[in-house]
Image: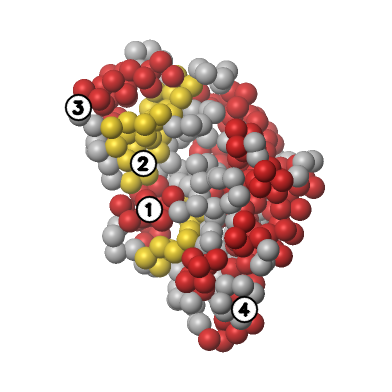
């Protein structure tokens, strides 16, 4: 199959360790993602074709040929990452011996996790995240909002800086990604004031190349529109525990799952707490999606965790040999 292992023998030769799966969100996309696996695994073509049928445009063409600016537009980024993640999930399921003990996704990645857990049909998820991206983009006029990653300060210090810098505008800590890495979001002018305060403390902050300020109060209107759409979507009870990044807990009722998806749009991503909860299930993590962002975060959250991304042929081979 091109990765050095006969997939028909994998289940017999390599009984899989118990593991948990994590699915990435925005920021993990890139042009040509999964290109090294595309010619080897038909699941990628099949999955992207299914998504393209729902979306009405050729998603694989966008991922392969760009333009990159369009791929980075949240309306296109979200279905692209979801589709890439589920393509990898399908490859894993076809070749691995057993399902994971639990799953979780970073922000958008929670939709991938719900698909993997059987709670959400893939076709419904594609249409849902496309609308989610559209609602988010329309909630804030272009150029009014911003997000930035603050490095080297504690959670409490970042929260305090946001309180000082908001001056009546929206500004809050929205992604608790790892110790010393917190993302802030809100009105662009407030974000820039916060960055100046970070600089005065001798620490670094980076403005993120995103088109909307996610997970802050500016997303309330998007959340209301998403809530309406969710009333038309069938969600089933997951057959694998799905840990929500809103509260780092596994929700089993359909009502609770929908409520968490709505609340997620305007609430912080508690990623550190989510990983800590998953680590009680297993110390072996699989990052199922494009890129290795979550693998890097796990190293900072808990150095004892072993995390294996699937996004390249050699990495997939290593994970399948666990």
Q: Does 203 sit above or below residue 13?
A: above
Residue placed under numbered mark 1 in the picture: 296
Asked if the residue at tag 4 contacts the one at tag 1, i.e. Cβ–Cβ closer than 8 Å, the answer is no
Q: Depth check: give the residue in front, 311 or 288.
A: 311
Decide: few, some or many residues near mark 1? Use Cα within 10 Å; few <14, some 14-19, many ≥20.
Answer: few
CA neighbours of label 3 inside 10 A, class few (<14), some (14 to 19), many (20+): few
Mark 1 or mark 4: name the one nearer the start of the chain. Answer: 4
Q: Is residue 309 above or below residue 212?
A: below
Determine which residue is flagged by label 2: 176
In this view of the protein, can residue 99 be seen by the observer? Answer: yes
Which tag, 4 or 2, sits closer to the chain's start?
Answer: 4
Q: Earlier in the sequence, mark 4 or mark 3?
A: 4
Which residue is at 33% across, 18% downward? 193
Q: Position of residue 177 (x, y in %)?
A: 37, 44
Direction top: furthest residue? 168
Q: Mark 4, mark 2: which one is toward the viewer?
A: 4
Q: Earlier in the sequence, mark 3 or mark 2?
A: 2
Which of the pair 27/109 is nearer the observer? Answer: 27
**Disc sitting over residue 201 in the figure:** 3
Marks 4 and 3, how far apart in space? Answer: 53 Å
What residue lies at 50% left-to-right and 52% top-to-bottom?
291
Q: Quadrant of residue 89?
A: bottom right
Q: CA distance from mark 1 to mark 4?
A: 28 Å
């Amino acid at each position: 199959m091109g990765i050095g292992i006969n997939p028909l023998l994998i289940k017999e030769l390599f009984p899989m360790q118990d593991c948990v799966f994590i699915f990435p969100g925005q920021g993990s996309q890139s042009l040509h993602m999964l290109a090294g696996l595309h010619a080897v695994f038909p699941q990628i073509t099949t999955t992207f074709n299914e998504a393209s049928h729902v979306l009405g445009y050729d998603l694989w063409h966008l991922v392969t040929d760009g333009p990159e600016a369009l791929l980075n537009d949240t309306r296109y980024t979200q279905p692209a990452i979801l589709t890439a993640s589920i393509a990898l999930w399908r490859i894993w399921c076809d070749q691995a011996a057993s399902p994971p003990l639990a799953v979780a996704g970073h922000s958008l990645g929670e939709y991938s996790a719900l698909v993997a857990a059987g709670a959400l049909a893939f076709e419904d998820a594609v249409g849902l995240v496309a609308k989610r991206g559209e609602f988010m983009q329309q909630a804030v006029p272009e150029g009014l909002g911003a997000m930035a990653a603050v490095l080297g300060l504690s959670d409490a210090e970042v929260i305090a800086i946001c309180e000082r810098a908001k001056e009546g505008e929206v500004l809050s800590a929205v992604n608790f990604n790892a110790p010393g890495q917190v993302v802030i979001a809100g009105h662009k002018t407030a974000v820039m004031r916060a960055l100046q305060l970070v600089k005065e403390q001798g620490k670094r902050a980076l403005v993120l190349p995103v088109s909307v300020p996610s997970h802050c109060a500016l997303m309330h209107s998007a959340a209301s529109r998403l809530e309406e759409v969710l009333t038309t979507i069938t969600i089933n009870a997951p057959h694998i525990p799905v840990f929500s990044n809103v509260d780092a807990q596994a929700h089993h009722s359909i009502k609770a799952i929908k409520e968490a998806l709505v609340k997620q749009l305007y609430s912080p991503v508690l990623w550190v707490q989510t990983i800590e909860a998953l680590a009680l299930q297993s110390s072996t993590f699989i990052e199922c999606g494009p890129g290795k962002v979550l693998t890097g975060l796990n190293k900072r959250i808990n150095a004892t965790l072993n995390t294996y991304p699937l996004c390249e042929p050699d990495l997939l081979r290593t994970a399948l040999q666990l």
